[in-house]
Image (cartoon, rainbow, N blue to C red):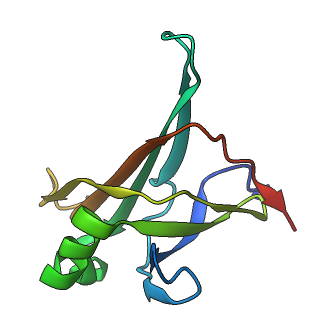
Amino acid sequence: MDYKPIGGIERCSLSAANAVDQSIVEVTLAEDCSEYTQTIDGSKRAMVVQHTLTLVAPTECAERWFDPDFLELVLYDGVVATLSLNSNARITTPTLRLQSLTSTTSKSVEQQPTTTLVLSNQTTTLNRPDYE
């Protein structure tokens, strides 16, 4: 049976919000674990879009996420993510900031230790994927 990619993030390049054309961090992602979500909240009679990017990488590949300069950047200035999806679509996010960074040792020998970086922000704009 042939595998037909439907969704999921294949690659993610993070750039400083003030220098979007220069990628600063790109790590190898764990397969079928990362996602980008947009949630529209209209409860206050105004459209607010919550953007959340969850990146999961094998811990050995996520070393750059723990760099103090990178953490300061994502905490204060923010980054823009350029996502390449398995469906051949591309998404460029608005400026996102650090929500959390979690590293786990896994529960068993069969599991790979992973690190999860969660970036988020609220805007009034909904992103649409560009299909190549």
Picture residue at 33% right of the left edge, 57% below the top? 97
Q: Is residue 125 left or right of residue 98?
A: right
**Location of residue 38 in the rendering, given as x and y in whole percent from the top left corner:** 55, 37
Quarter of the image containing the N terminus? bottom right
Residue 112 shows up from this direction: no
**Location of residue 14 in the rendering, given as x and y in whole percent from the top left corner:** 46, 75
**Location of residue 128 in the rendering, given as x and y in whole percent from the top left corner:** 74, 48
Picture residue at 46% right of the left edge, 78% below the top? 18
Q: 20 or 27, which lies in front? A: 20
Picture residue at 17% right of the left edge, 61% below the top? 109
Q: Is residue 118 above or below residue 23?
A: above
As drawn, which residue projects farthest toward the right?
132
Indicate the quadrant where residue 103 lies.
Answer: bottom left
Picture residue at 50% right of the left edge, 84% below the top? 19
Q: How many marks?
A: 0
Indicate the quadrant where residue 131 lies.
Answer: bottom right
Residue 117 shows up from this direction: yes
Q: Is residue 66 left or right of residue 74?
A: left
**Location of residue 25 in the rendering, given as x and y in whole percent from the top left corner:** 40, 83
Q: Is residue 111 above or below residue 120?
A: below
Quarter of the image containing the C terminus? bottom right
Q: 78 or 8, which lies in front? A: 78
